[in-house]
Image (tube, rainbow, N blue to C red):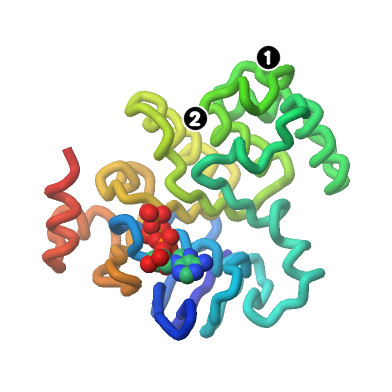
């Protein structure tokens, strides 16, 4: 579902992210970890052609679309519906004066999808009463789960999640990670998660890429990278985890 070869993103000639190889198949989960500024979010945005004022080179295929060469129409066809981005603070992207239920019904209609909003939110462990709320009346964790519910209702095949748990306390973090893990198993979603927390993402990811200063310093199956990290930076990240 995601195929990346030699992706490089530059701002004003400065390389801020370089990913030699990244593949995520249906039903797989891959995590990108690294400290703040290591290029994780930039990589995620580049996968959907969303970087602004950046020079992006290499090859990126998402849901069969050649992202770096596709026109706006082709990109619109995958963004949102087939490949959904769940951001750090999804509330900011939601219209503040529209109830969540209305928002979801409108999005479904726009994409010509028939789905039950109540079932969609319950699938991510939210109470259906949330559909009557406004975006500012819900927590960051609820907003992230709502964004995931919307993506799934729209029939997303790929979910790109940026720090999906950053706004959440530890219990809720585990819940969101659990929801994503279940969706992947039940619906064969391809998941790409970005986080600074190596231990947390390893609970759900099959493989992990460790980024530092815009370069991938290590990658491989989670179990191997966690138990036998080969790069000193990975060991530092692991030691920094409580
Ligand atoms: N629009 C932009 N213009 C110029 N430089 C940018 C732009 N966006 C990001 N950068 C630079 O790219 C680098 C990588 O940033 P990025 O946000 O991808 O890191 P990150 O690993 O996701 O960090 P965080 O965990 O804090 O979100 C940083 O040095 C940042 O300053």
Instruction: Classify the position of ligand 1 by quadrant: top left, top right, bottom left or bottom right.
Output: bottom left
Question: Can residue 35 be seen in this snapshot?
Answer: yes
Q: Residues within 10 Å of mark 2 (few under 14, many from 20)?
A: many
Between discs 1 and 2, the one toward the N terminus: 1
Q: Is residue 205 above or below residue 96?
A: below
Percent coordinates x, y for residue 78 in the rendering: 71, 61
Q: Residue at x 12, y 48 (%)?
A: 239
Residue closer to the observer: 63 or 78: 78
Quarter location, residue 206: bottom left
Q: Residue at x 67, y 17 (%)?
A: 128
Q: Quadrant of the C terminus?
A: top left
Q: Identify residue for label 1.
A: 129
Mark 2 CB within 8 Å of ligand 1:
no
Q: Is residue 5 left or right of residue 32?
A: right
Q: Residues within 10 Å of mark 1 (few under 14, many from 20)?
A: few
Q: Is residue 93 above or below residue 39?
A: above
Question: Is disc 2 placed on a helix, strand or loop?
Answer: helix
Q: Identify residue for label 2.
A: 141
Q: Is residue 13 above or below residue 223?
A: below
Q: Is residue 4 left or right of residue 221?
A: right
Question: Is disc 1 placed on a helix, strand or loop?
Answer: helix
Percent coordinates x, y for residue 238 in the rendering: 17, 50
Question: Can residue 31 be seen in this snapshot?
Answer: no
Percent coordinates x, y for residue 148 in the rendering: 59, 39
**Total label count?**
2
Residue closer to the observer: 17 or 156: 17
Q: Residue at x 43, y 71 (%)?
A: 22
Q: Is residue 129 left or right of residue 222?
A: right
Distance between mark 1 and mark 2 Cα atoms: 16 Å
Q: Quadrant of the N terminus?
A: bottom right
Residue closer to the observer: 1 or 162: 162
Percent coordinates x, y for residue 117 in the rendering: 75, 28
């Amino acid at each position: 579902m995601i195929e990346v070869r030699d992706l490089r993103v530059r701002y004003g000639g400065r390389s801020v992210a370089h990913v030699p190889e990244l593949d995520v198949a249906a039903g797989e989960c891959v995590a990108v970890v690294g400290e703040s500024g290591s290029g994780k979010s930039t990589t995620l945005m580049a996968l959907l052609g969303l970087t602004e004022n950046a020079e992006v080179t290499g090859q990126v295929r998402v849901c069969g679309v050649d992202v770096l060469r596709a026109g706006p129409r082709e990109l619109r066809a995958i963004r949102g519906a087939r490949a959904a981005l769940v951001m750090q603070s999804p509330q900011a992207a939601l219209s503040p004066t529209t109830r969540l239920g209305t928002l979801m019904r409108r999005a479904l209609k726009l994409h010509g999808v028939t789905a039950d909003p109540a079932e969609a939110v319950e699938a991510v462990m939210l109470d259906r009463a949330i559909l009557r709320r406004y975006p500012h009346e819900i927590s960051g964790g609820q907003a992230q789960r709502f964004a995931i519910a919307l993506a799934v209702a729209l029939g997303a095949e790929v979910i790109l999640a940026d720090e999906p748990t950053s706004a959440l306390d530890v219990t809720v973090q585990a819940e969101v990670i659990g929801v994503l893990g279940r969706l992947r198993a039940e619906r064969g979603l391809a998941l790409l998660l970005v986080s600074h927390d190596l231990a947390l993402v390893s609970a759900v990811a099959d493989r992990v890429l460790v980024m530092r200063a815009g370069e991938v310093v290590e990658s491989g199956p989670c179990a191997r990278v966690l138990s036998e990290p080969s790069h000193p930076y990975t060991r530092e990240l692991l030691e920094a985890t409580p």
